[in-house]
Image: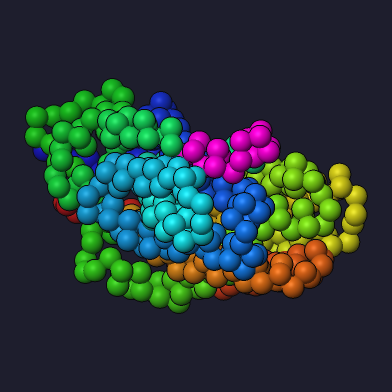
C-alpha cells in the first residue's frame, strides 16, 4: 500500500502555480478585508460632520466593527475546522462586503454601528482563516515569508481606501467609499471553486479524491498506486476540545502572553488606523495631506510585512518581531520632535513598517506556534482576544481627541504601548515555538 504524508509533502514541496493560486486568493481576500476595515477611519471626519456626532460617539461607532471582529475571529476561526475553509471564507466575504456597503445608506450612528458590527464578523473571521490556509500550504523554507506577503494585502486594501477617499470624499460624500465595498461579492463562486479546503479537514473526512488532486498539484508527476492511504503526523490529530489544547503541552503561558500582547498591539495599531486622519487634520493638515499620512503608513505596512517575513524565515521569528515593535516605539517618539512634513511622511512610513507590519509578523508567529489541527483556533482566539484592545481603542482615543491634547502627547502614549507589546512578545516561550515543528512532523499515524 502506498502511504503519503501530506504535511511532509507540503513542507518539502517547491513553490509552484498551485501555491501561487492560493497566495493570490488569500492576498485578495486580505486586501478586501483591509479596505473594508480601514474605510471608516478614512471617512471619519466626513461622517462626524454630516451626522453631527462628537469624537467620543465616533469612537464608539468605529468600535462596533471591531467588536464584531472579536466574535468573528473567535467563532468563525474555529468554524472552519468544522465546515471547511472554502465555506467559511465565502461566508466572511459575503458578510463584510454586503454590510459595509449597506452602512453607506445610513444617516445616523445607531444603524451605522449595527451594520458595521455585522460586517465586523466577516472581517474578523477572514483573517485567522487566510493565515492558517497560507501557512498550511506553504513550503516550510519560505512559510513565514509567503504568509507575511499574503498579509501585505491588508496594506494594499488600506492604500486603496485612502486613494479612493481622496478621489470621492469631497465630490461624492463618505457614502461612496462604502458602496465601493460591494463588488467583491462576485468573487464568492470562484472562491468556492478554486480554494482548496484545509488538509486536516479533508483527512478527517477521508476525502481521498480531493487529497489526490491536491497532492498531484503539490508534486506534479507523482505516480499513485491502486491502494493508497493518506496520512498525517500524530500532532495533527485533535485530542479533546481544540480550545483546551491551546493550553496543553507547555503552551499555556505563551497562549496567555499572545493574548495580552495582541490586546496591547491592536490597541496601539487601531488608535493609528482610526484616528490618524483626524489627528493630522486637527494639527493643521488638509484632508488630502492627512490621507497621505495614511498612505505612507500602509506603504510601510507592506514593506514591513514582506521584509519581516523574509527575516523571519532566516532568523528567529520571535526576536525579529520584538525588534520591529521596539523600533516602532522609537519611530512613534520621533513623530513628536519634528515639524518637517516631508520627514514626517518618511517617519510615518517607518512607523507602518514596525507597527502594522510587525503585527503581520505577529500573526504569522502566532499561527505557526500551534499544531496544524488547532492552528485556526489558536490564531482566531489570539486575534479575538486582541480585538478587545482594538474595540476599546477608538473611544478612548476619541476621549483624548475631545480633550484636545497635543499631537506629541497622543503619539507618546501610542509609543509606550508599542514598547509594551515588544516586551510581552519577548516573554513568549521561544523554545516551545522551536519544538512545534517536531510535533507537526512526528511519526505518522493514519487519520
Find residue 233 and report its horizontal and vertical position in percent.
26, 53
Residue 394 falls in which quadrant of the image?
A: bottom right
Whether 258 is drawn above or below 125: the answer is below
Looking at the figure, which quarter contains the N terminus? top left
Residue at the farthest left position: 227
Query: In this view of the protein, which residue sits in the foreground, 117 or 73?
Result: 117
Residue 395 is covered by the magenta coloring: no
The residue drawn where x is 74% and y is 58% is 279
Residue at the farthest bottom position: 253
Find residue 302 and report its horizontal and vertical position in percent.
62, 42
Residue 9 falls in which quadrant of the image?
A: top left
Give the colour scheme shown. rainbow
Residue 17 falls in which quadrant of the image?
A: top left
The residue drawn where x is 77% and y is 54% is 280
Secondary structure that dominates the magenta span: helix
Find residue 166 and report its horizontal and vertical position in percent.
68, 37
The residue drawn where x is 71% and y is 69% is 402
Number of numbered discs visible in the structure rendering: 0
Find residue 201 and report its horizontal and vertical position in percent.
23, 49
Whether 399 is drawn above or below 230: the answer is below
132 left or right of 353 in image = left
Q: Can residue 318 be spotted in the picture?
A: no
Query: In this view of the protein, which residue sits in the foreground, 313 or 303?
Result: 303
Residue at the farthest top position: 221
Whether 235 is drawn above or below 133: the answer is below
- What stretch of residues is rendered in magenta? 166-181
The residue drawn where x is 65% and y is 65% is 55
Q: Can residue 339 be spotted in the picture?
A: yes
Amino acid at each position: 500500500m502506498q502511504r503519503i504524508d501530506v504535511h511532509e509533502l507540503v513542507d518539502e514541496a517547491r513553490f509552484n502555480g498551485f501555491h501561487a493560486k492560493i497566495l493570490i486568493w488569500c492576498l485578495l481576500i486580505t486586501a478586501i478585508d483591509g479596505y473594508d476595515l480601514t474605510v471608516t477611519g478614512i471617512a471619519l471626519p466626513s461622517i462626524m460632520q454630516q451626522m453631527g456626532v462628537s469624537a467620543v460617539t465616533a469612537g464608539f461607532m468605529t468600535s462596533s466593527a471591531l467588536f464584531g471582529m472579536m466574535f468573528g475571529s473567535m467563532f468563525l476561526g474555529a468554524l472552519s475546522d468544522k465546515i471547511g475553509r472554502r465555506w467559511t471564507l465565502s461566508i466572511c466575504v459575503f458578510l463584510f462586503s454586503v454590510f459595509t456597503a449597506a452602512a453607506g445608506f445610513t444617516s445616523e450612528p445607531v444603524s451605522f454601528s449595527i451594520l458595521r458590527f455585522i460586517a465586523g464578523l466577516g472581517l474578523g473571521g477572514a483573517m485567522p482563516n487566510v493565515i492558517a490556509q497560507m501557512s498550511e500550504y506553504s513550503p516550510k523554507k519560505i512559510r513565514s515569508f509567503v504568509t507575511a506577503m499574503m498579509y501585505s494585502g491588508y496594506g494594499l486594501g488600506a492604500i486603496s481606501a485612502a486613494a479612493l477617499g481622496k478621489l470621492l470624499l469631497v465630490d461624492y460624500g463618505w457614502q461612496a467609499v462604502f458602496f465601493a465595498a460591494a463588488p467583491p461579492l462576485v468573487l464568492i463562486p470562484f472562491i468556492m471553486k478554486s480554494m482548496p479546503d484545509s488538509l486536516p479537514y479533508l483527512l478527517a473526512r477521508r476525502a481521498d479524491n480531493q487529497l489526490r488532486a491536491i497532492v498531484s498539484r503539490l508534486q506534479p508527476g507523482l505516480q499513485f498506486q491502486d491502494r493508497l492511504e493518506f496520512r498525517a503526523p500524530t500532532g495533527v490529530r485533535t485530542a479533546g476540545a481544540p480550545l483546551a489544547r491551546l493550553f496543553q503541552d507547555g503552551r499555556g503561558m505563551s497562549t496567555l502572553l499572545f493574548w495580552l500582547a495582541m490586546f496591547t498591539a491592536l490597541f496601539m495599531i487601531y488608535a493609528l488606523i482610526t484616528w490618524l486622519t483626524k489627528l493630522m487634520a486637527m494639527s493643521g493638515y488638509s484632508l488630502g495631506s492627512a490621507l497621505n499620512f495614511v498612505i505612507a503608513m500602509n506603504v510601510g505596512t507592506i514593506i514591513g510585512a514582506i521584509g519581516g517575513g523574509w527575516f523571519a524565515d532566516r532568523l528567529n521569528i520571535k526576536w525579529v518581531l520584538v525588534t520591529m515593535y521596539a523600533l516602532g516605539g522609537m519611530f512613534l517618539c520621533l513623530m513628536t520632535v519634528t515639524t518637517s512634513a516631508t520627514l514626517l511622511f518618511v517617519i510615518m512610513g517607518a512607523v507602518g513598517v514596525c507597527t502594522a507590519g510587525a503585527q503581520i509578523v505577529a500573526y504569522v508567529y502566532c499561527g505557526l506556534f500551534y499544531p496544524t489541527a488547532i492552528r485556526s483556533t489558536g490564531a482566531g482566539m489570539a486575534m479575538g482576544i486582541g480585538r478587545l484592545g482594538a474595540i476599546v481603542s477608538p473611544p478612548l482615543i476619541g476621549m483624548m481627541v475631545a480633550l484636545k491634547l497635543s499631537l506629541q502627547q497622543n503619539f507618546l502614549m501610542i509609543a509606550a504601548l508599542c514598547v509594551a507589546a515588544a516586551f510581552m512578545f519577548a516573554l513568549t516561550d521561544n523554545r516551545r515555538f522551536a519544538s512545534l515543528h517536531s510535533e507537526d512532523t512526528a511519526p505518522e499515524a493514519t487519520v
